[in-house]
């Protein structure tokens, strides 16, 4: 068999990992592109042993970058979620953790010129239309990456990438509350269907028979719980105008509970068929919108936050995620203007990945 070599960078962005490619190095049509990405990740092989994936949703992601033709934008970022156990690629969602590596990759790949001290990178998320500005720490010799094991809370001494999101409302449906209601009842459970950076279904943990403080392993072992979540998610997807979402990772699902440490709220985020080991950035932004919007299921968890700027600290299985939101409430509706997070990134490898020549 003949092989094609495709240049890539392997970068950990936030709590996920992905190969980053230039769009010009990949097949132009979507069907062939999907086939190439399946081979890159090794989808459908045990533990993705035949590719660069790692056997879980957070390690089976791909970032594809290109120069943007949009005004006031440097880079277009196309995200692909490869299903670890199947031969399937989902281009519907985006990923905020992988977004943390887009700025560094754009600099490394020559799409953005490095500046001294800090380099701004203006990004368009192709999947959702969101606009993001990343502030990337840079040195004379290149991008300043976080060291192994770096953590974000407090960020003391850790090089962090600042991500500021705008135009996130209605990422897929065009509306913050796609059903037209702050609360819907599905299968006897009150939920809020929210679309900001990522369409999500949000419910109170107690209404689903859990505390919301369980570990990922504890939740992943409760298959009847996931069966109930999926039934609610499928109906919510229909009501949100997303159609049949049985084979789509959106909408995602999250549960809320009162904080147990110094956070604003405790939450668990589902991808959607298992629990996230931490929290997705886009999920954190959408959850923040749910927490800020009047009348949602969050109102029994915490009082209405005051604006025009607030920090929401989300307690998740492996720590916390802080989201800084700029917002206003007009006529009982949320106006989410900007949302910002801090993440780290680390370059892990660079080289060429090989796929069959027909896919190169």
Image (cartoon, helix red, strand yellow):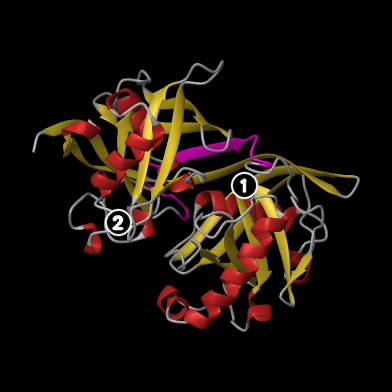
Up-down relation of residue 157 to residue 354 (above or below): below
Mark sitting earlier along the chain (2/1) = 2
* Residue 334 within the magenta-colored segment of the rendering: no
Q: Residue at x 77, y 62 (%)?
A: 296
- Does residue 341 appear to the left or right of 201 in the view shown? left
Q: Quadrant of residue 47?
A: bottom left
Where does the image place residue 155, in percent across and percent down from the top left?
Answer: 43, 50
The N terminus - image quarter: top left
- Does residue 285 appear to the left or right of 217 in the view shown? right
Disc 2 from disc 1: Cα separation: 24 Å
Label 1 CA crowd tier, 10 Å (few <14, some 14–19, many 20+): some
Which residues are the magenta region? 153-170
Where does the image place residue 325, in percent across and percent down from the top left?
Answer: 66, 45
Where does the image place residue 58, in percent across and percent down from the top left?
Answer: 37, 56
Q: Quadrant of residue 129?
A: top right
- Does residue 273 appear to the left or right of 242 in the view shown? left
Q: Which disc number belongs to residue 40? A: none
Label 2 CA crowd tier, 10 Å (few <14, some 14–19, many 20+): few
Q: Which disc number belongs to residue 324? A: 1
- Does residue 309 appear to the left or right of 75 in the view shown? right
In depth, the one of 327 and 49 nearer the eye is 49
Residue position marked by numbered label 2 in the rendering: 149
SS at mark 2? loop
Q: Main secondary structure of the magenta part?
A: loop
Tell me, yes or no, if residue 145 can be seen here: no
Up-down relation of residue 188 to residue 276 (above or below): below
């Amino acid at each position: 068999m003949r092989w094609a070599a495709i240049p890539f960078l392997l970068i950990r962005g936030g709590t996920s990992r992905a190969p980053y490619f230039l769009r010009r190095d990949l097949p132009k049509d979507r069907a062939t592109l999907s086939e190439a990405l399946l081979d890159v990740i090794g989808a459908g092989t045990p533990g993705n042993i035949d590719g660069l994936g790692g056997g879980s949703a957070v390690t089976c992601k791909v970032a594809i970058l290109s120069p943007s033709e949009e005004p006031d934008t440097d880079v277009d970022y196309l995200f692909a979620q490869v299903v670890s156990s199947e031969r399937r690629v989902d281009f519907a969602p985006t990923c905020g953790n992988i977004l943390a590596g887009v700025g560094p990759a754009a600099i490394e790949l020559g799409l953005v010129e490095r500046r001294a001290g800090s380099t701004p990178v203006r990004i368009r998320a192709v999947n959702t239309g969101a606009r993001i500005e990343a502030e990337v720490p840079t040195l004379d010799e290149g991008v300043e990456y976080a060291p192994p094991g770096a953590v974000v809370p407090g960020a003391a001494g850790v090089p962090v990438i600042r991500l500021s999101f705008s135009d996130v409302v209605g990422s897929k449906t065009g509306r913050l509350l796609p059903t037209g209601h702050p609360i819907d009842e599905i299968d006897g459970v009150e939920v809020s269907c929210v679309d900001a950076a990522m369409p999500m279904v949000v419910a109170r943990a107690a209404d689903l028979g859990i505390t919301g403080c369980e570990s990922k392993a504890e939740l992943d072992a409760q298959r009847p719980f996931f069966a109930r979540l999926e039934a609610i998610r499928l109906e919510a997807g229909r009501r949100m105008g997303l159609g049949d979402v049985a084979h789509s990772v959106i909408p995602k699902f999250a549960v809320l509970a009162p904080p147990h440490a110094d956070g604003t709220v405790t939450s668990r985020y589902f991808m959607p068929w298992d629990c996230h080991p931490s929290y997705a950035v886009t999920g954190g932004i959408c959850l923040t919108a749910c927490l800020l919007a009047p009348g949602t299921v969050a109102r029994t968890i915490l009082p209405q936050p005051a604006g025009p700027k607030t920090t929401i600290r989300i307690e998740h299985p492996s720590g916390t995620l802080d989201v800084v939101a700029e917002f206003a409430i007009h006529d009982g509706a949320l106006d989410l203007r900007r949302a910002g997070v801090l993440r780290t990134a680390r370059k892990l490898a660079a080289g060429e990945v090989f796929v069959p020549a027909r896919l190169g």
